[in-house]
Amino acid sequence: MEKGFSPVGLRVLVVDDDPTWLKILEKMLKKCSYEVTTCGLAREALRLLRERKDGFDIVISDVNMPDMDGFKLLEHVGLELDLPVIMMSVDGETSRVMKGVQHGACDYLLKPIRMKELKIIWQHVLRKKLQEVRDIEGCCYDGGADWFTQGQFLGGGEDVSFGKKRKDFDFEKKLFQDESDQSSSSKKARVVWSYELHQKFVNAVNQIGCDHKAGPKKILDLMNIPWLTRENVASHLQKYRLYLSRLEKGKEIKCYSGGVKNMDSPPKDAEINSGHQSPGKSSSYAFLKATETDPKQLASASVSDPTSDIHMPQKAKKTRIGFDPPISSGVFGSLLPWNDVPDPLESKPPILYENSFLQQQPLPSQSSYVANSAPSLMQEEMKPSYVNPDEFLMPQNKNSTVILQDMDLSAPFSSNATSNTESIPGSLNWELPEAHHSGSLDTDLDFTWLHGEHFFANSGLQNFQFQDYSNSSSTSLLSELPPHLWYGNDRLPDPDEYTLMVDQGLFIS
Amino acid sequence: MQRQVALIKQSLFDQKIIIRTQMEKYMQGYLDEQFVELEELQDDANPNFVEEVATLYFKDSARLISNIEQALERGSFDFNRLDNYMHQFKGSSTSIGASKVKTECTMFREYCRVGNAEGCLRTFKQLKKEHATLRKKLEQYFQASK
């Protein structure tokens, strides 16, 4: 909406395995004055989306694709990136359309598609943005401060004149920038909610007390981070709240698709968890997603080449940490390291998770690793991750040890270290804050097992945490971790109790 | 003066209509409005857009046809798979507005749905025929419009 919302220059990503349609759609969209990127493979599309987190406004995808089901792609995009997605198909059967809607598609087009249908797809982008605003408005109120009114918001256009009542209405500004900004492409840099940042956020929220009273402004003030804007906080708060409410709902669900399960978070995680919700989700989701795209690869070869898959998740994560609670809670459940994902797997349990995560579980290896490494790894990961989610992710290329090594082994947890061995989950959890598990930092961890396990590379670390370390039997945890950690690796060890280190993991994205 | 302009305009207009009608007659039944849409997309930036699209379509559809052929030859009649292929093919055919081909696709899928192997084979044969005819016609069409 930086352009005061004009459809011109809308950045569209078209995904279709049919080259003829791809060409036609590209031409049609160009004629609508949109900025078009085409993609013949779903996986490729996901990669692109994750690479350029804020690079697209809307995605149009075919339902039937060889490498990935269009609905799955839809899920991923919706969860990870929160972009509006339009489905297309030559088949207009009610059940299919319904499926699309259920998976979160904002529209379903029948082929042959006409120009006039494409001319108005921008409405979905606008609608989504408005919804975001409304949500934020709804969730966060600053002790009575008023948010801009919706009407004003709508009436904005380039002219940012909402009757703002607050002085620093960054939010509004960001939504509608001046015409002079129109040339820029829209996106404002997304804030990466690193673990630490999220921690601060949660602390601030808790400090204020009942989070219902906590408004973005207050939180922002408490957090005292110069570059953070109220808008960032507001949107994060919204997600956090949603996350919390989901927690309420699905407490009983512990094991989400075996995938990334949030490790048990220690009681005090509660807060953290809530906070982490989004980040975790996103990250974990990202992981999941990653795996999703290439579950086999991950599954089979923990050692496999991380780069491809890993990258994905990482990027995805990084860029967009907070995504709104995923459609299928299940998915998130696993992802959320923060806490046992309360959300029962609602909608489609993350397909991802199921296949991916679960599979891997028993990684043959090094159980010992798990015990030790987990904590240490975690720590390492955690540490760095929070601090700099990118760090985690970075290693990806490095495979194996690299990552760990890079990490700051001086695990913060050291204190808790011990505990983890058995409950690896705990330690693994990223949760730095909780560090309860941290268990011993086993810096000496033999990262070797990591070798080849790219997962560290990617932020696998993060995944780590999700895994249920507690299954210490989960020796494989570690081993497993790598692949799945990656993001969405399928193999998430027993979901049972993943400590939610979530914050870390999640944010790592 | 104005009248002259009007007349000239009119004549131009009529000419266009005449040409179009002829083309339409030629292609009648084989192509639907989608094709017209494609023509409307053609512009200075892409002066041969329609032809390019058609070329792409025929290239891709040849591949799909061969897939289906192989599947049918196997004799095992995996209707699900066949239906999948046909779904793809149908989608592709809608891209250029190949209406007769599309009709055959729909029929084929229907036979798959009820598990009628013989119907599938028959329809597929017809489909290939339509496909080949369309290809030829379009080739001529593009030749003529150059």
Image (spheres, coloured by chain):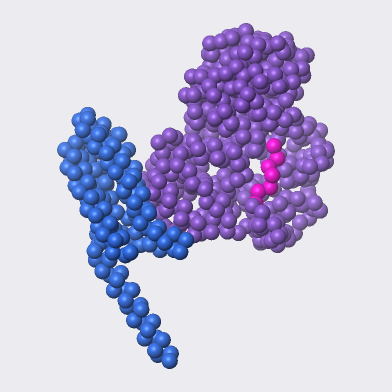
Q: Is residue A207 left or right of residue A256?
A: right
Q: Which residue lies at the image location 69% right of the left edge and 15% below the top edge?
A: A375
**Front residue of this view, candidates B122 and A331:** B122
Q: Which residues are magenta?
A: A186-192
Residue at coordinates 71% horizontally, 51% vertically from top-left?
Answer: A174
**Where residue A133 sits in the image (x, y, percent)?**
66, 49
Chain B color in figure: blue
At 27% from the left and 47% from the top, the residue drawn is B106
Residue A187 magenta-highlighted: yes
Chain corresponding to purple in the figure: A
Residue B27 at least partly seen: yes
Q: Is residue A341 above or below residue A86?
A: above
Residue A281 percent across, percent down from the top left = 62, 32
Res A340 → quadrant: top right
- Of the pair B127 and A463, the residue shown nearer to us: B127
Residue B50 placement, left or right of A173: left
Residue B70 picture quarter: top left
Q: Main secondary structure of the magenta part?
A: loop
